[in-house]
């Protein structure tokens, strides 16, 4: 159980020792693949969550501003269409944009329950504290969970429920995992519940490349933070400054791929694993960030027994919010 009494934990987080064991097995598995890979969930300790917040304010990273624009324009319509009284948000982070939806729900329905789910425990605690101070009419019931493993919800008191998965975090899951995740959400949905899904749209690769290679180097620091997390959590001895950030758009696969490349040959020790030798320039893939169009979102939703009932884009068609309903 987490040290935060008022938060629930879901399968996959468990106690510290169990979490460490699971992480070690996952890291061993990922680093033995070719290309070597690590799950993007390891970006998000408290520092990583702060770095992500910094990314959302960068001039090159348009995603958050575009999604905010849609939420400002469409929240009232979404709330009127769904009559939602509970908002369950996956990968909630700081819930910065979510406040727009919550305010619209409050204006429409009065009392509102908010269930933010995130793997980043300390950051989730801060989000809850901030919301409880700022928004007195809101009941907040945070859940610490790895949504890739299971989504265990507290009993839902006020229906209907609007599930939200914003920020294009779905894009960080490969297609089979994204479908499995959407199915897990769909399994929780009653016929009158809806899912609001944020997806980044396909566009000029130069715009995408710039968004993941910002001139201030914040994304590079965010990327390298994963090695700091491995050092802190597993006692690894990565030297983050000895790995270079690389991100590029893979046009054929419609995704950004992000890597850390070894600067010079090096050997890394992680207690419990055999030493790992990196050749000069060898990479670890740390993130995929898929980009969509409407038919790709419809295909993903359809595979999870969901269908798109509304599709909203920002003024420059950079980002989409779709409202999904369970297929009868
Ligand atoms: N929804 C916010 C934050 C997006 S950043 C926004 O739109 O700006 C991605 C968030 O998902 C982070 O807060 C991270 O901690 C969380 N996250 C990433 N992988 C996760 C996982 N496997 N399970 C639960 N949360 C996860
Ligand atoms: C959280 N996720 C949707 C971000 C993205 O754009 O894929 C994470 C990120 N990676 C680099 N910059 C931002």
Image (cartoon, rainbow, N blue to C red):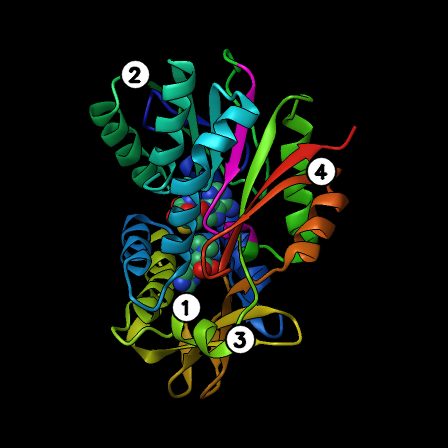
Considering the numbered disc 4 on the image, is that residue within a helix, a strand or a loop? strand
Q: Residue at x 47, y 27 (%)?
A: 87
Disc 3 under 8 Å from ligand 2? The reply is no
Report how far apart the C-alphas of labels 1 and 2 lie in the structure: 50 Å
Tell me whether the residue at label 2 lies in contact with that at label 4, contact meaning CB atoms closer than 8 angstroms.
no
Identity of the residue furthest to the right in this view:
328
Expressed as whole percent of the image width and height from the top left, the position of residue 127 reads: 29, 35
Residue under pointer 1:
269
Q: Is residue 140 visible?
A: no
Identity of the residue furthest to the left in this view:
133
Residue under pointer 4:
306
Q: Earlier in the sequence, mark 3 or mark 4?
A: 3
Tell me whether the residue at label 1 lies in contact with that at label 2, contact meaning CB atoms closer than 8 angstroms.
no
Q: Earlier in the sequence, mark 3 or mark 1?
A: 3
Does residue 105 appear to the left or right of 50 in the view shown? right
Q: Is residue 78 above or below residue 264?
A: above
Considering the numbered disc 3 on the image, is that residue within a helix, a strand or a loop? strand
Label 1 neighbourhood size at 10 Å, few (<14), some (14-19), many (20+)?
some
Q: Residue at x 43, y 39 (%)?
A: 118
Say which mark, if any, is on residue 137: 2
Label 1 vs label 4, nearer the camera = 4
Does residue 138 appear to the left or right of 162 in the view shown? left
Q: Residue at x 24, y 28 (%)?
A: 129
Expressed as whole percent of the image width and height from the top left, the position of residue 12 reads: 53, 37
Considering the numbered disc 1 on the image, is that residue within a helix, a strand or a loop? loop
Report how far apart the C-alphas of labels 3 and 4 lie in the structure: 28 Å
Residue under pointer 3:
249
Tell me whether the residue at label 3 lies in contact with that at label 4, contact meaning CB atoms closer than 8 angstroms.
no
């Amino acid at each position: 159980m987490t040290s935060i009494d008022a938060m629930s934990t879901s399968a996959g987080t468990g106690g510290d020792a169990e979490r460490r064991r699971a992480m070690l097995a996952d890291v061993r598995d990922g680093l033995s693949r070719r290309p070597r890979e690590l799950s993007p969930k390891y970006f998000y300790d408290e520092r990583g969550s702060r770095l992500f917040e910094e990314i959302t304010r960068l001039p090159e990273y348009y995603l958050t501003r575009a999604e905010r624009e849609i939420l400002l324009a469409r929240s009232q319509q979404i709330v009127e269409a769904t009559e939602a009284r509970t908002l369950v948000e996956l990968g909630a982070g700081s819930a910065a944009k979510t406040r727009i939806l919550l305010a619209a729900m409050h204006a429409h329905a009065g009392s509102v329950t908010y269930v933010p789910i995130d793997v980043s425990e300390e950051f989730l605690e801060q989000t809850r504290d901030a919301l409880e101070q700022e928004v007195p009419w809101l009941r907040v019931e945070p859940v610490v969970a790895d949504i890739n493993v299971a989504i265990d919800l507290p009993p839902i008191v006020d229906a209907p429920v609007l599930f939200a998965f914003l920020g294009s975090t779905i894009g960080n899951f490969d297609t089979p995992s994204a479908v499995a995740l959407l199915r897990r959400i769909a399994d929780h949905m009653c016929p009158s519940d809806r899912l609001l899904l944020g997806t980044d749209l396909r566009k000029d690769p130069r715009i995408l490349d710039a968004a993941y290679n910002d001139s201030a180097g914040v994304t590079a620091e965010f990327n390298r933070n994963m090695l700091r997390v491995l050092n802190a959590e597993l006692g690894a001895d990565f030297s983050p400054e000895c790995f270079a950030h690389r991100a590029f758009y893979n046009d054929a696969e419609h995704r950004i791929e992000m890597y850390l490349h070894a600067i010079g040959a090096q050997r890394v020790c992680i207690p419990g694993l055999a030493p790992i030798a990196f050749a000069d320039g060898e990479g670890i893939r740390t993130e995929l960030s898929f980009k969509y169009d409407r038919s790709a979102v419809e295909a993903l939703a359809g595979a999870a027994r969901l269908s798109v009932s509304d599709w909203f884009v920002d003024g420059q068609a950079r980002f989409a919010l779709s409202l999904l309903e369970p297929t009868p």
